[in-house]
Amino acid sequence: MRANVINTQAKSILRKQKKAESWFVSRYGMNLYRGCTHNCAYCDGRAEKYQVEGEFGRDVAVKMNAIDVLKREIDPTHKRKPLRPGFIFVGGGVCDSYQPVELQYELTRQALQLIAYYNFPVHMLTKSTLIERDFELLRRIHQQSCAIISMSFSSVDDAISARFEPGVSRPTHRLKTLAKFKKANFPIGMYLMPVLPFITDSPEKIAESVKAATDIGIDFIIFGGLTMKAGRQQEHFYRILREYDARLIPQYENIYSGNPWGEARKEYYDSISHLFAEICKTFQVPIRIPPFIWRDFVDETDRVVIILEHIDYLLKLKNQKSPYGYAAYSISQMKEPLRHLYNQLQQIKGIGNSVARLIREILDTGSSAYYEWLLLGKRPPQ
Ligand code: SF4
């Protein structure tokens, strides 16, 4: 669909996260547009909570001054304290950075030029093959530091995608784009999210997606279920779902029954997450971004936080209790670098002897044998 463009001015572009984000290994994020003509049926950018102006799927707010603002935010000569090192995540949120308006306004390309100039690593996430336009620019970033190229999928089934993701490149095309980046030695990832309940969440459909990704040498797959907030998002999705197969509506109503954040029942999420983890184990594909990709491009406190959160996720998937998530949170709230407390880690809330030992191992070696065993199945820890 052709976008109805709304010109806007932004006060800020670079979103500094309170803590390193372990799903994307990023410290910063940005939305150069608001709204998205890719118009995916399930997009939560449609939910009232995000206050996207206009009609979602048709209207797109273009932040006309975005590049000037970003330059001010990223240029170290404009700052008393330079930005902390870390990945800038370009994607997700309430827009796709490579939706069709990008062809005209080129905000993503200009932002990448700044990112390359100031030497930050990036993590790109899109559903559009237009990202290939910026191949050389991304290659420059990857040669200087790191550019992770990820694409999101609800499945790799082109026919289902055409019904629920009308404005995006078909999954087979997205996979080809990822394969091109892989061939040029970029790390590539699949965000298999959201899978659609009773449509793309079956063992066969998930296995089909995982296999297609491993066939092109995917470095990791991150999985997530659909959230559906009451209001515009749900009304729109149910309209499309009814046209697809009205018999599914009662099944959806059964699992999405009024949670204020639009979450499905916990048992449903648990069952599909376990299924996904089992399938990825068979295909030997990591379900978090492996540390060899990113660990040299984040500071060591962030490295610890991300690894602890990954361990927390992996243990919970095995239905095991984990002290690691809380420890990661406590560390992320500290003002001083973690290394200053190398010998007094137990003073930090939530950190006992074994977690402290693991943190020291990360500080000393950049990773942890236990973590690599959980994530990559590497040699078992002693
Ligand atoms: S591409 Fe992403 S942001 Fe755009 S409509 Fe689809 S889910 Fe929403």
Image (cartoon, grey):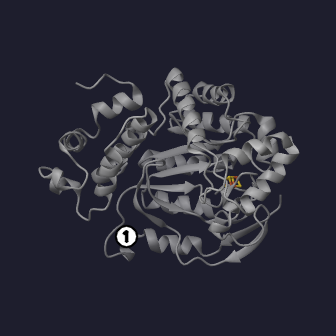
Q: Going by the image, does 14 lie left or right of 179? A: left
Looking at the rendered image, the quarter that the C terminus falls into is: top left
Viewer-side residue, 325 vs 293: 325
Which residue is pictured at 52% across the width and 21% down the height? 282
- Tell me which corner region of the image, top left, top right, bottom left or bottom right, holds residue 201: top right
Viewer-side residue, 260 vs 301: 260
Q: Is mark 1 within 8 Å of ligand 1?
A: no
Residue type at mark 1? Pro
Residue 256 showing in the rendered view: yes
Residue 191 showing in the rendered view: no
What is the x, y in percent for residue 268?
60, 39
Q: Residue furthest left?
A: 343
What is the x, y in percent for residue 14?
49, 67
Which quarter of the frame holds ligand 1? bottom right
What is the x, y in percent for residue 96?
66, 56
Element at label 1: helix
Q: Going by the image, does 365 lie left or right of 103? A: left
> In the figure, 328 relative to 198: above or below?
below
> In the figure, 11 relative to 339: above or below?
below
What is the x, y in percent for residue 278?
52, 26
What number of labels is visible? 1
> In the figure, 191 relative to 228: above or below?
above
Callout 1: few (<14), some (14-19), or many (20+) C-alpha neighbours within 10 Å? few
Q: Going by the image, does 122 lie left or right of 81? A: right
Residue on which disc 1 sits: 76
Which residue is pictured at 19% across the width and 53% down the height? 339
Q: Going by the image, does 292 lie left or right of 192? A: left
> In the figure, 51 relative to 191: above or below?
below
Looking at the rendered image, the quarter that the N terminus falls into is: bottom right
